[in-house]
Amino acid sequence: MINVKYFDFHLKGKKPDSDLALINEAKRLGYHGVSIFYSNEQYNLALENFNKIINDETSPTHLKSFKIDDFSITPGIIIQGKNPHHLQKQIRSLRNKTNILMVDGGDLKINRAACENVKVDILSRPYYKRRDCGINHVLSREAAKNNVAIELCFNDLLKSRNSLRSKIIAHFRDIIKLQRKFHFPLLITSGARTIYDLRTPQDIMALYRCLGLNKEEILMAISVSPSFILDYNQQRKDMVVDGVKIIDEK
Amino acid sequence: MKLKILPPTLRGDKRYLAFEAISQIQLPRDDLIFMIWESCLKFHGECETSKFRLWVTRSWDLNSNNSKKDYFHLKGILQCNRGDEEKVRGALCLINNYKGKKLVFHTLGLAGTIKSATQKFIKPSP
Amino acid sequence: MITPHNIFQHELIGLTVEIVESSHQGLEGIKGKVVDETRNTICLERPDGKEIVVAKSTSLFHFRIPEGLVVEIDGKVLVSRPEDRIKKKFRKI
């Protein structure tokens, strides 16, 4: 069997110590890479901390992603846009600062602005605090065109119960249905704040099998799409326009 | 801003369950919805209930013309996912009390549109 | 002057090119010089003098520009007539 690499693309960062514990736990559970998200203000501080803890001698100081053995840690920025204009301003200023840019969804205008922006990597939880799933066929098509991944957050299931949980599952199903038609990238993440929110990749896969995804789709969401986002963002600085890339050849 | 509604091909199929409820207390719409959801959740669980797409489209209060009776009478139409009608019916018939008072749900019938559900089961034409 | 920033709008005839990926496996690895171009195809002259016609939309090209830089271009970007490509809008990242 091909060696599958599992990624967890949404850990919520707070303090350096607890973050490291979280990352180590994810590593122990069998993930091959995580992405940990901070707000804009905390990002620089977190980056310095990672520099101190992990790559103390060998690598240059302003690396945007880190590695322990084969385990990759990619810090990213999560943006809470107040309105589409504010969001766009933030995206423009933060794009070159970080590897992964995530937009916290929920508001319709924000969802739309995020789906329409090529610079955004992930739209997190479009269904958040909503009575519908937050995206429709129009937004799905935009997201597919601009390669914006839509995130299904496990933490939302974990922290809700009864009818709320059931409704969130229904929103997941709606998003999955749209994904099957429009083929935007889907991401399955944990959204963990503490080590108690983390589950092994196999458990997560089993859970999402129950929600109507099949094995290939889950592998796409937990392994292929994340690694695609990582690769794509490595190349972003060499890209001139979409599809045109400068290659260094000596 | 409102989301543009999905095209009919993506909306998914629906069926309409006409039901009546007879209870010892007045049932506002919110309580009705809560009760149906609660029963479905208890009987089928969260994962299964999420497939049902339950929605109380309309309810008729039938108390005004027979106010002397000691029970409250109510009819309504419940929208659900096609293929899961039997499961919803099963969950509905398990409701027997609410807030300590007795009540009963009867399903009157199943229809493909709201209009036909109303005409056939709620207000049958003479 | 031809640079990586305008190559996708520029005249391609005369550039050396290598086909890196293609849905037709036999075309992969072929090197040559562009001698002609239509809306959907590029005509290459191989070193041995043979000319072949390659569909743009299914291939990935490595163009070598005169300064020595190599630019990777997805053929889908190039699909349009050369004289129309100047007007075409490209999505910036």
Image (cartoon, helix red, strand yellow):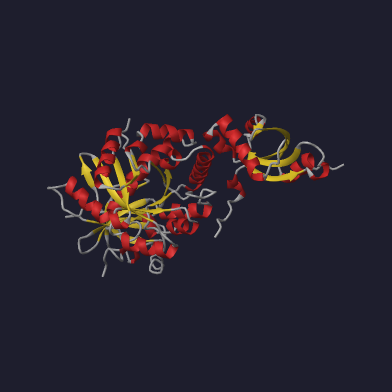
For image coordinates 46% across by 55% down, the residue present is A111
Asked where in the image residue A115 lies, by quadrant, the reply is: bottom left
> In the figure, B23 relative to A112: above or below?
above
For image coordinates 84% across by 43% down, the residue present is B125
For image coordinates 55% across by 33% down, the residue present is B48
Would you say residue B37 is visible in this rendering?
A: yes
Q: Residue C61's spot in the image, x, y percent?
A: 31, 54
Q: Quadrant of the C terminus of chain B?
A: top right
Would you say residue B14 is visible in this rendering?
A: no
| Residue C21 falls left or right of residue A124 | left
In-front residue for pair C11/A73: A73
* Residue at the extreme left: A57
Q: Quadrant of the N terminus of chain B?
A: bottom right
Q: Residue A1's spot in the image, x, y percent?
A: 33, 30
* Numbered marks: total: 0
Q: Residue B11's spot in the image, x, y percent?
A: 59, 46
Asked where in the image residue A197 lies, by quadrant, the reply is: top left
Q: Residue A46's spot in the image, x, y percent?
A: 25, 51
In-front residue for pair A243/B121: B121
> In the figure, B58 relative to A117: above or below?
above
* Residue at the extreme right: B126
In-front residue for pair A44/A58: A44
